[in-house]
Amino acid sequence: MDVRPTAPTTLRPLGVGELLDRAVTLTVRNFWALAALNVAFVALIEVIQYLGGDDRAHLVTAMTQVLQNQAAGKSSSDVFKTLSDYQSAGSWTIVAFAVTFFFLPLPTAAMATAAGAFYFGRTLGFAGAYRAAVRVWLPSLLLIVTYGVAGACAYLGVILVVVALALVIGLVSVASKALGIVLGVLLAVVFVPLALLGAVLVGLAYQVSFCTVVLEGANFWDGFLAGFRRVFRGVGLRRSLLVGLAYFAVFFGIFVVSAVGQGVLLGLVKSNVLGSIFAVVINVAAGAFATVFLVLFYYDLRVREEGLDLQAAAFALPADPSPAN
């Protein structure tokens, strides 16, 4: 992996548009270097799904039939029967999940390390990126487990809140059915967007925690706390809301392009091989851009909240060998 160094980046607060622009520029400029770090893992997952009998052409056909059934006004049982005809990968799905859980942190950490180096105009080879990734592999796995446990607890909390709200709405409906309906609609209008925004912010907090572990060498617990502190506190919260919505919009567009492309290949050409190749290309490109974008967002948060730009400037100043008397 041979990458020519770019001009060192000048750290400063970036607007959302500037953040996206720098992420696109850095990704395009170093695409092959970033892709080389991730393509083997993405291809391995696709091979596992292919060997497991993940017949995507069959799935496209099933989804087409579902849409046709709904347009024809058929019952839900017909729709569910169509979906049940799609055979899942079975035990291979477990293998894919295990490989993803244990090995995904490696290429992701390697790309994050490389993206950080490229951002500051330094070079980093394939071996160097993976050496850095191996050093933070265990903390990265522990970070994933920590977020998983915290997410499970949060999920249970949300379920309890939903049950409590449902009971309140039920009691109100006993007294006034119309008031109960109005209250239910209002709570749904408020609760659903808040839940979605919360999910986006927690997702960003995980990514910032991961960058903290990888780029700062922090342990998993310090990374976990730093992610929440940087995203949910002060200017970080406002910033994360804007960046999170932009990030969601970009990747929704990528998802649509991926779905349409695979739909054409699998529905018309009916080739699982071409569908898998297309999926590898899209996933590698999206993974490279996502990693670069999140690394830049991590640095932007540190500039805004911790004065990283001032620290870097002060560190770069030469020491005065002859202080004034």
Image (spheres, rainbow, N blue to C red):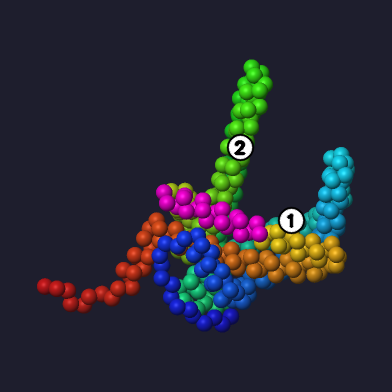
Query: Which residue does the image show at 18% across and 77% down from the upper left?
Result: 322
- Quadrant of image for the C terminus: bottom left
Q: Is residue 113 visible?
A: no
Residue on which the image places disc 2: 189
Secondary structure beneath dot 1 equals helix
Answer with the quarter of the image where residue 165 lies: top right
Q: Nearest the camera: 21 or 77?
A: 21
Could you give the CA–CA distance between mark 2 and mark 1, rounded to whole angstroms?
37 Å
Q: Amino acid at mark 1?
A: Ile
Residue span colored magenta: 234-253
Residue 1 magenta-highlighted: no
Q: Is residue 101 above or below residue 312?
A: above
Secondary structure beneath dot 2 equals helix
Residue on which the image places disc 1: 94
Horizontal and vertical percent position of residue 166: 64, 28
Q: Is residue 145 above or below residue 321?
A: above
Query: Which residue does the image show at 46% across and 76% down from the upper left?
Result: 121
